[in-house]
Image: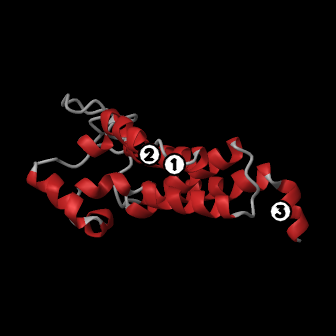
Amino acid sequence: MLQKTHSVAGMLAAEGVLVHFQVPLLSWETAAALLIGCLAGPLADIDKPGSTMAKVFFPLSFVLRLTNVRHRTMTHSVLFLFAIATLLTPLPELLFWSFLLAYASHAFIDLFNYQGVELLWPIKFKFRLLPKFMAIETGSYKESGFRYFLMLLCIALPVFYNWDTVSDLF
């Protein structure tokens, strides 16, 4: 999937966390969680040379390349997710879960791609949720439709759970 699709999925994951913690729609905490979601969503692609995340975090991306970490392996695995969770434990609970679930959304939506993901890395077995003929190819019209569906959910979720606040704006 493209970075913009991962960003939208990360933001949707962060919105789910905001709903769970009943954070007010118009607050600094909401802004921080949504920003974290947009950035953590595509972060797993740091292992893909040329990606925006690989360029932003060049030193780490360079180390991954030197150690021959392939795309959709280590940084997309459950093991790596647990390592990140361990590193993030000092964060406030809202930000911790926003980051973690947004990061996890990356591997989840990559499971819809025909290439699959090595979720159990270092075991070399790729998982995917759809058969190849139904899978979503990166950059395809199917991915655009999937991204627009995620965007609709990003709009619907806060409106549904914060209707009183939203209706007061009008």
Mark found first going from the N terminus, 1 or 3: 1
- How many other residues sit within 10 Å of disc 1, few (<14), some (14-19) or many (≥20)? few
The residue labelled by disc 1 is 91
Residue nearest the viewer, comparing 162 with 142: 162
The residue labelled by disc 2 is 88
The residue labelled by disc 3 is 166
Spot occupied by residue 107 in the image (x, y as percentages of width and height) = 38, 43
* Distance between the alpha carbons at the discs numbered 3 and 2: 32 Å
Pointer 2 with pointer 1, Cβ within 8 A: yes
Q: Looking at the image, which residue is at 60% across and 47% down?
A: 94
Q: Is residue 50 above or below residue 72?
A: below
Secondary element under disc 3, as helix, strand or loop, is helix
On the question of residue 88 being in view, the answer is yes
Q: Amino acid at mark 2?
A: Leu
Spot occupied by residue 103 in the image (x, y as percentages of width and height) = 43, 48
Pointer 1 with pointer 3, Cβ within 8 A: no
Q: Is residue 107 left or right of residue 91?
A: left
- How many other residues sit within 10 Å of disc 3, few (<14), some (14-19) or many (≥20)? some
Q: Amino acid at mark 3?
A: Val
Residue nearest the viewer, comparing 3 with 29: 29
**Foreground tag (1 vs 3):** 1
Mark found first going from the N terminus, 3 or 2: 2
Pointer 3 with pointer 2, Cβ within 8 A: no
Q: Amino acid at mark 1?
A: Leu
Spot occupied by residue 27 in the image (x, y as percentages of width and height) = 72, 63
* Distance between the alpha carbons at the discs numbered 2 and 1: 6 Å
Q: Looking at the image, which residue is at 50% across and 44% down?
A: 101
**Quadrant location, the C terminus:** bottom right
Tag count: 3
